[in-house]
Image (tube, rainbow, N blue to C red):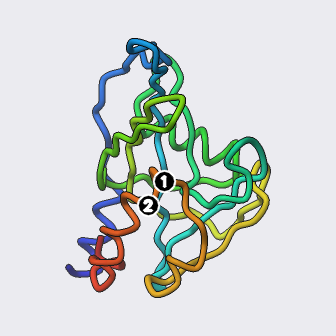
Amino acid sequence: MHNSEKSSIFASTFACEPHNRKEWNRGDMKSIEVVAAVIFDEQGRIFATQRGYGVWKDWWEFPGGKMEAGETPQKALCREIHEELDAEIEVGELLRTIDYDYPSFHLTMHCFKCRLAESHVILLEHEAAKWLKAKDLDSVRWLPADEEIINELKILEDQWITL
């Protein structure tokens, strides 16, 4: 893919219709729908954040969070990244939607290819963050749902910059 084609991926305008996305119960298991930013840089690295709270404290994840009623996934992702990292991102294409059953809830996570619009990042909710190359992805303990896409990213390493 040429450099100009790479830029056009992020210049796309999304025409998603607003959704009413809230937590809902499916039987005894609560379901939660979230968005996650798989943030790539020009050096072939992916941005990872370490949770600083809750049951999964100290585990690593892609930044993002719950969608609010009426938000498109892309708008939710921009809002969440601003709230968590005080940063602006450019949201690209959907890489994958992951459905994962945790012990107490079902998670639907929409993972989008992103890049930072600026290098400015402040950790407002996370304990730590780092940029990882494919060979380093296993150096951190990923949340189980995030591991689902990690395996695919390792396979696609040679395409990271053009993804």
* Rendered position, 47 above or below 36: below
Three-letter residue code for mark 2: Glu
Number of other residues with Cα within 10 Å of mark 2, as a class: few under 14, some 14 to 19, many 20 or more? some
Q: Is residue 124 above or below residue 45?
A: above
Residue at x 58%, y 52% (from the top left corner): 63
Left of 64 or right of it: where is 127? Answer: right
Residues marked 1 and 2 touching at CB (< 8 Å): yes
The disc placed on residue 147 is: 2
- Percent coordinates x, y for residue 13 in the rendering: 32, 44
What element does badge 2 sit on?
helix
Residue at image coords 57%, 39%: 65
Relative to 41, say whether 96 is above or below: above
Q: Secondary structure at mark 1?
A: helix
Q: Quadrant of the N terminus?
A: bottom left
The spot of residue 127 in percent (x, y) is 79, 59
**Residue, x 55% and y 62% (percent of image)?**
142
Q: Which mark is residue 144?
A: 1
Q: Looking at the picture, how far across and down is residue 122, in whole percent?
A: 77, 59
Q: Is residue 125 above or below residue 24?
A: below
Nearer the observer, 5 or 155: 155
Q: Position of residue 123 (x, y in %)?
A: 77, 57
- Seen from the viewer's position, the closer of residues 109 and 101 is 101
Identify the residue at image location x=43%, y=31%.
Answer: 106
Of the residues shown, which amino acid type is indicated by label 1?
A: Pro
